[in-house]
Image (cartoon, rainbow, N blue to C red):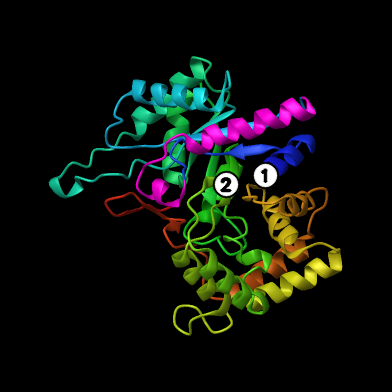
Amino acid sequence: EELQQVVDLAHTSNAAFLDTAERYGSHMKTAFGLGYHETEELSAVLLDKAVAVHGQSERPAIIATKFTPTPWRTTVQSVVDACEASRQSLGVDQIDLYQIHMPDIVKPFRFLGQDETFDKVYWDGIAECYHRGLVKNVGVCNYGPTLLAQCQEHLDMRGVPLASNQIGYSLLGRHNGSQQTLDYCRDNGIDVLAFYPFAMGLLTGKYSTKNADTVAAASKLSGIEKSLRNSKKSRLEMTDLMRYAKGDGKDIPEGGITPLLSVMERVAEERQKTVAQVALNYIICKGAIPIPGVRSVAQLQDNLGAMGWRLTEDEVTMLELEADKLGFGFDGAGFKRTSEKFVGYGVEKFSLT
């Protein structure tokens, strides 16, 4: 089982950071709010096997999961109960990092005027989890500077430090408030965890012109895998990614991200690194922690090669200038978006402001 091999290597390399969430399941289950705790349980099984075979590592795995704001969760106790359920699913005494998955935007009855938000209740909830010893650190996801300032002040009154904020951030994803949010976090002692550091694979060159046709054909053959262990990108996601890769002549100029990839390839060749390693190292240089998804041992080995060196300031500037010349940023693909969530009854949007 390749996923087990991936976790084994991460564990023995002292580089195991498992970021999951209570609501993560397969594609369709996650989209419709089903499959709660499936990936938490899978993560626990894989990590337990790694420890059983290889023994404890010098740096034990860091396990992070997330609380999901929902209309029926309106009390501090609802957060504590969810945290306890995640702790049991993960099989740990304490969760290393417990995060609020997003601002309280899921409001199915907004059209009836029922749009009260419970963000402060959730902040009190994660603070209670912290004081009860259920979690070691607390964080948030998809918060912009305004909400971050309110959250940090609120937690400070409870004697709880805000450890992290997880946002979409990459060389292609610095717009829509992402860069301003990173700057705010850096100035206020909040670590930024950057999801979509490869812009869902675009910044690895996987969907470049020379590879796109092969990848697209393979996608049509495989379809949407139901298994958590073999999950692939959906056709809708592939359609959007190909649009970024090749351009559509409308929102995205013909050629897509090819000009940026050409510069990244040149930097990679000069540095004797891969394009993917350049993409990850760029994020590290910007002061954030990239959290790339990994599905194979080869991918993990490549990701590990992004550590132990740094791009120069001139290289960072050159990459940013080339990315800016494209005239567009990465906003996600399919139902996986950087500033909106598909929540079963429709789409709810938020902004990093």
Chain part drawn in magenta: 26-55
Q: Is residue 4 above or below residue 318?
A: above
Question: Disc 1 marks which residue?
Answer: 1
Tell me, yes or no, if residue 106 can be seen here: yes
What residue is drawn where x is 77% and y is 50%? 301
Would you say 260 lies left or right of 328 here?
right
Which residue type carries mark 1?
Glu
Q: Give the image quarter of residue 45.
A: top right
Q: Earlier in the sequence, mark 1 or mark 2?
A: 1
Helix, strand or loop status at disc 1: loop
Q: Give the image quarter of residue 35.
A: top left
Q: Is residue 52 magenta?
A: yes
Q: Around disc 1, counting alpha carbons within 10 Å, would you say few (fewer than 14), some (14 to 19), or many (20 or more)?
A: few
Question: Disc 2 marks which residue?
Answer: 229
**Quadrant (top left/top right/bottom left/bottom right) for the N terminus:** top right
Q: Around disc 2, counting alpha carbons within 10 Å, would you say few (fewer than 14), some (14 to 19), or many (20 or more)?
A: some
Q: Is residue 248 magenta?
A: no
What residue is drawn where x is 74% and y is 35%? 11
> Decide: marks 1, 2 in contact (CB < 8 A)?
yes
- Picture coordinates of residue 32, whole percent (x, y): 35, 47
